[in-house]
Image (tube, rainbow, N blue to C red):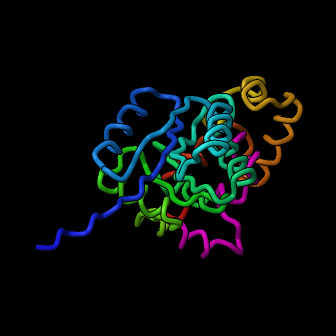
Amino acid sequence: MNAEPTVIVETIRVLIGDDHRIVREGLKQVLAEAPDVLVVSEAQSGPEVLAQVAALQARAGIDLVLLDIAMPGIDGLDVLQALKREHPRLPVLMLSTYPEKQYAVRCIRMGASGYLNKSADPDDMLAAVRKVAAGGVFLTQATAEALAAAVGQAGAQAGPEALSHREHQVYRLLTQGQTVSEIGAQLGLAPNTVSTYRARILEKTGTKNDVELALYAERHARSPKTP
């Protein structure tokens, strides 16, 4: 009787970047259920993600980065930009508590291979990890709808998608109630520079002050046409 051939399962080596330990532990628990996925490292800040990726790539390498958007030290979107510049072939799957319609399109345009809400079903998480690590792009139905809406709006550049990356960072912090000085300290910008960005944001959004801007952000967050 001939023995069945041995099936060799290639291991997907993952780095998790998230500033909340409870989230990292939850992700590790989900990924531990899959025999073909191995979490080789974790980081809790933007600079730590970049340093660990560089170190790992210099040794055995990794196959995927799971990256939170709201990272301390360096914003998660800036980390994504740096990773795609320094390691263009390394897939990045963005994770967030924000709905797909708010950030998914921006992340995909910046080079992410997928966008997943942290409340996603564990089976969807594993499916996303496997597809992205294999070189594919993982799109939930909500992300696909947001992309379709963005294509339809391309000519008009409506909504927050009309903002540049840096303008969007300032926009997000302004709508969270942070002051110009606080935003400058967080982003490493002079207060005058932040004020200039604020003026551009108000002009592009058609708002007159921070209160109107907050109402604008809430309205677009709820709109199915806003990515």
Relative image position of residue 69 (x, y in whole percent): 57, 42
- Residue drawn at (65%, 48%) of the image: 80
- Residue drawn at (51%, 35%) of the image: 41
Q: Is residue 143 left or right of residue 6?
A: right
Q: Is residue 80 left or right of residue 21?
A: right
Q: Is residue 159 magenta?
A: yes
Majority secondary structure of the magenta segment? helix
Any part of residue 227 in sight = no
- Residue 104: quarter of image: bottom right
Q: Could you tell me which quadrant the C terminus lies in?
A: bottom right
When the figure is inspected, residue 98 is found, relative to residue 223, above or below; the finding is above
Relative image position of residue 112 (x, y in whole percent): 59, 57
Q: Could you tell me which quadrant the N terminus lies in?
A: bottom left
The magenta region covers 146-172
- Residue drawn at (63%, 41%) of the image: 53
Q: Is residue 54 left or right of residue 97?
A: right
- Residue drawn at (48%, 69%) of the image: 144
Q: Is residue 43 left or right of residue 153?
A: left
Q: 178 and 14: which one is in front?
A: 14
Relative image position of residue 9 (x, y in whole percent): 36, 59
Q: Is residue 158 magenta?
A: yes
Q: 102 and 46: which one is in front?
A: 46
Q: 48 and 11: which one is in front?
A: 11
Any part of residue 74 in sight = yes
Relative image position of residue 108 (x, y in whole percent): 60, 61
When the figure is inspected, residue 43 is found, relative to residue 104, above or below; the finding is above
